[in-house]
Image: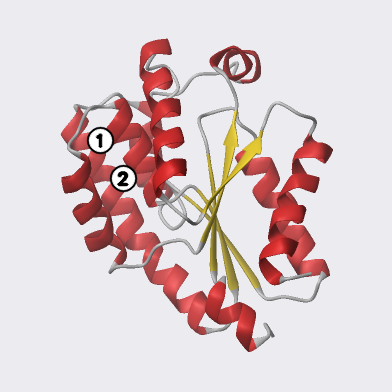
Amino acid sequence: MLPKKQKNLFRYIAFEGIDGCGKTTQAQFFVNYLKREGFCVYFTKEPGGVNNKIRNLLLEEKWPSKTELFLFLADRALNIVNVKREIEKDCIVVGDRSIYSTMAYQGYGGGLDLEFLEKLNLFSTEGLRPDVVFYFDIDLKTMKNRVKKHDAIESKGDSFFMRVRKGYVELLKKEKNFFLINGEKSKEEVFRSVLKIWKSLLGD
């Protein structure tokens, strides 16, 4: 059971970054760490946290920008039901992507209106935002070296991912709950950075 103080402050932790940044690996490391510490933990991902059919639609076929957006939002609306349920059970929710992926990918990357996306995001999540966001920053060269098999999103091209990365940097400047981590380092070094930030948030 989570201590009441931690439950109220840091219930929902998101891992963000461009493809190949290592966020999925680090999220799994973090989940394992929290479980070792005795916490109730719920891991989820976007897209596909609840329904892989939507995930497959998004990753296996290219869609017009508005269609792609609403598929992501539909997936998130399904997922948030479980996220809220687990938070109510005093679990820490660890998410591989969140509303900020939509802002970075469909907003900054795809050119859709950011203010409109913000409203749609909060509608799909019933106002729920991550309490803490670990943002893993890598350059495009590293992304290309790491991502060998390209799905419909990953195949969008360099200029798209340059805009997405710049978008994350803008979010980092705007959002107080964003924490920058150098994703270029080894997995072990990156995770040490994650734990350092996490422990500092808890006052350890």
Q: Is residue 130 left or right of residue 114?
A: right
| Label 2 element class | helix
For label 2, the residue is 72
Circle 2 crowding by C-alpha within 10 Å: few under 14, some 14–19, many from 20: many
For label 1, the residue is 68
| Label 1 element class | helix
Q: Amino acid at mark 1?
A: Glu
Quadrant in the rendering for residue 149: top right
Residue at x-position 60% and y-position 31%: 21
Quadrant in the rendering for residue 53: top left
Residue at x-position 76% and y-position 55%: 195
Q: Are marks 2 and 1 in contact (CB under 8 Å)?
A: yes
* Near-viewer residue (203 or 123): 203
Circle 1 crowding by C-alpha within 10 Å: few under 14, some 14–19, many from 20: some
- The CA span between labels 2 and 1 is 6 Å
Q: Is residue 193 above or below residue 85?
A: above
Horizontal and vertical percent position of residue 68:
25, 35
Q: Is residue 189 left or right of residue 198?
A: right
Point out the image quarter for the C terminus: bottom right
Residue at x-position 19% and y-position 46%: 115
Q: Is residue 97 above or below residue 41?
A: above
Q: Is residue 150 above or below residue 96?
A: above
Residue at x-position 22% and y-position 46%: 117
Labelled disc at residue 57: none
Horizontal and vertical percent position of residue 17:
52, 36
Point out the image quarter for the N terminus: bottom right
Horizontal and vertical percent position of residue 161:
42, 21
Q: Amino acid at mark 2?
A: Phe
